[in-house]
Image (cartoon, coloured by chain):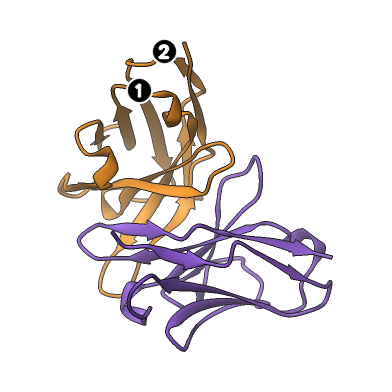
Chain colours: A orange, B purple
Amino acid sequence: QVQLVQSGAEVKKPGASVKVSCKASGYTFISYGISWVRQAPGQGLEWMGWISVFNDNTNYAQKLQGRVTMTTDTSTSTAYMELRSLRSDDTAVYFCARTTVNDLRGDFDYWGQGTLVTVSS
Amino acid sequence: QTVVTQEPSFSVSPGGTVTLTCGLSSGSVSTTYYPSWYQLTPGQAPRTLIYSTNTRSSGVPDRFSGSILGNKAALTITGAQADDESDYYCVLYMGSGNWVFGGGTKLTVL
């Protein structure tokens, strides 16, 4: 069965960086993209960006441009999201999601369990 | 800046029917945005309910249905149950690897 397993919770100081991993199993990794979505405390879901595992094309939300990088390692079927220059309002649960983009769909069908990133001095 | 709009909250009686909507701050939602719907319960990962406007994800009961109503995407829950009490989010695909979430609707079943 399809599974996305994320790395554990992180506590970071303002200005630091965090790198969250998302290990995929149960499907052909390069056949789908991976999106990253976050939810800050008391807030809604926010799309952060997407990476095509097939060709490493990326697209990031405008507000995160310059601070976020998404990568994949096809040898281990793992996706990574690195966020730099962390601020207190980056405190959130971060989710990875398998993403299908083709002529018939553009959506997220399987999700990781979430990773809590806390930014605090 | 594209804004996807949802009702902040909605209430439905057990066994009742409720329709949540997903609109655009300017323009109409059509099937070309591949609207999808997600259920989010505290402490859990989002659950995919509907994709491509009206296709139920695997394992989702048929009391959840998606459609286009007028100029909005819609999620209808028929025969609401207590465990449907959750936050519901729609997402629109804007093309070129770009998605926008709506603000979410908090559904109360009482």
Left or right side of A28 for A89: right
- Which quadrant does the N terminus of chain B fall into? bottom left
Give B27 or A117, whichever is nearer the viewer: B27
Q: Quadrant of residue B27?
A: bottom left
- The reply to whether discs 2 and 1 touch (Cβ–Cβ < 8 Å) is yes
- Which quadrant does the C terminus of chain B fall into? bottom right
Q: Could you say where residue A25 lies in the image, as x and y percent from the top left?
A: 42, 42
Residue placed under numbered mark 2 in the picture: A13
Residue placed under numbered mark 1 in the picture: A86
Q: Amino acid at mark 1?
A: Leu
Q: Looking at the image, which residue is at 50% across and 23% down?
A: A8
The kind of secondary structure element at disc 1 is loop
Q: Looking at the image, which residue is at 61% across and 65% down?
A: B59
Q: Quadrant of residue B100?
A: bottom left
Q: Residues within 10 Å of mark 1 (few under 14, many from 20)?
A: many
Q: Could you say where residue B54 lies in the image, as x and y percent from the top left?
A: 49, 79
Q: Amino acid at mark 2?
A: Lys
The kind of secondary structure element at disc 2 is loop
Give B18 or B27, whichever is nearer the viewer: B27
Q: Looking at the image, which residue is at 17% across and 44% down?
A: A56
Distance between mark 2 and mark 1 Cα atoms: 7 Å
Q: Callout 1: residue from which chain?
A: A
Same chain check for tags 2 and 1: yes
Residue B50 versus residue A12 in the image, above or below: below
Q: Looking at the image, which residue is at 81% across and 62% down?
A: B82
Q: Could you say where residue A54 lies in the image, as x and y percent from the top left?
A: 19, 50
Q: Quadrant of residue A41?
A: top right
